[in-house]
Structures are given as structure tokens and as C-alpha cells.
Image (cartoon, rainbow, N blue to C red):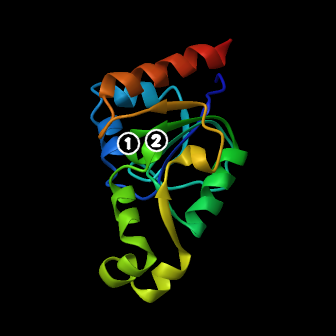
Amino acid sequence: MAKKPLLGIFSFTCCQGCQFTILYIEKILDILKKYDVQYFHLLKEKNRESKFDLAIVEGAITTKREVRKLKKIRKKSQYLIAIGACATTGGVPAMANILGKEGKKKYVFNQKMLYDSIDAQPLKNFIKVDKEISGCPIQKKQIESELKGFLKKWRK
């Protein structure tokens, strides 16, 4: 059996609409069969120890814990695509940034969560991002094209 590229699809602070968009691609199962999907919690169990040829990440970064997790993902990934407005600009979660720490304490977080909280930010503020696909949510054709295109590049 030919080796398949290792794929991880991750989510941080967001509505997960971009991951659902991936699932709504008409031929997604045919596409995913060409990958060794190691991490995609909407479809299967998670393999947190894997390395990834391709990592797809949605969501804004809003906590110190998420920063650490994101950096681990980047370190284990050859190529990383940020998908959606949250991952590329901070998106809807960044709207809470205008509240400041005191406003978040009053309206958004409990005390424990506030301790770990940072202003919502895009992935590129913490790691190298190889490609960005914006939108809220992303367009199916864009991510489908990236998944197919990566397979062509990976084989060479």
C-alpha cells in the first residue's frame, strides 16, 4: 500500500463552521481516503502524538494554553493552512477584545478562565502560517482545491 500524507484538522476558539464546511464537501470521503487522517475530532479519535504532512487549523487563539498547543501543532507539521476568519484575523472572538480584561471578567469569563485569557488573535501572530483561507465560513471549493492540490505536490 502506498504511503499517504498524514493529515490533522484542528480547532481553537470558534464555532467550528469551517470544519463543518469541510464535511459538507460532496466528495469529502473520497478525498480523505487519500490521506492518513490522524486528527479530526469531528470524524474520528484523536492521535495527539502524530506528526503531520498537512495541518489545517481553524479558530482564534484566546488563551495561553491555546498558544502552547498551536506551537506544538506547528512544530509537528510540514505545511499549515489557517482557515476561516477566526484563524486569519481573530474573527468574532476578537470582538471581545474591546471589552478589555475588566470587561471580560464582568461579562465573559469566570475568574479561572480569565487568568489564562489573552486577547483573541490570528494564528500568524504566534506561528508561521504557510497559507490562509479566509471567510466565515470558508468556501467548500477553496478547501477542496487545497486538499487536492496538496496531494499532487506531496506525491512529487
**Residue at 41% over, 81% down:** 102
Q: Which mark is residue 85?
A: 1
- Check the picture and name the quadrant holding the N terminus: top right
Q: Which residue is label 2 attached to?
A: 88
- Does residue 22 sit above or below 40 in this rendering? above
Residue 151 shown left or right of residue 87 in the figure: right
* Picture quadrant of residue 3: top right
- Going by the numbered disc 1, the residue's amino acid type is Ala
Residue 38 vs residue 53: left or right?
Answer: left
Left or right of residue 64, residue 142 in this image: left
At x 53% / y 55%, what residue is drawn? Answer: 46
Above or below, 37 against 96 in this view is above
Residue 109 visible: no
Expressed as whole percent of the image width and height from the top left, the position of residue 14 reads: 37, 55
Q: Is residue 14 visible?
A: yes
Q: Residues within 10 Å of mark 1 (few under 14, many from 20)?
A: many
Which residue is at the far bottom? 111
Give the x, y percent position of residue 85.
Answer: 38, 42
Instruction: Decide: few, some or many residues near mark 2? Use Cα within 10 Å; few <14, some 14-19, many ≥20.
Output: many
Q: Is residue 26 above or below residue 93?
A: above
In percent of width and height, residue 74 lies at 66, 46
In this rendering, position of residue 10 left or right of residue 78: left
- Residue 61 to residue 55: above or below: below
Give how far across and how far down residue 21 sits, in percent: 30, 37
Residue sitting farthest toward the right: 75
Q: Which mark is residue 95?
A: none
Q: Is 23 in front, or is 115?
A: 115
Tell me how far mark 2 sits from mark 1, CA to CA. 5 Å
Is disc 2 in contact with disc 1, using a CB cutoff of under 8 Å? yes
Secondary structure found at label 1: helix
Tell me which corner region of the image, top left, top right, bottom left or bottom right, holds residue 35. Answer: top right
Looking at the rendered image, the quarter that the C terminus falls into is: top right
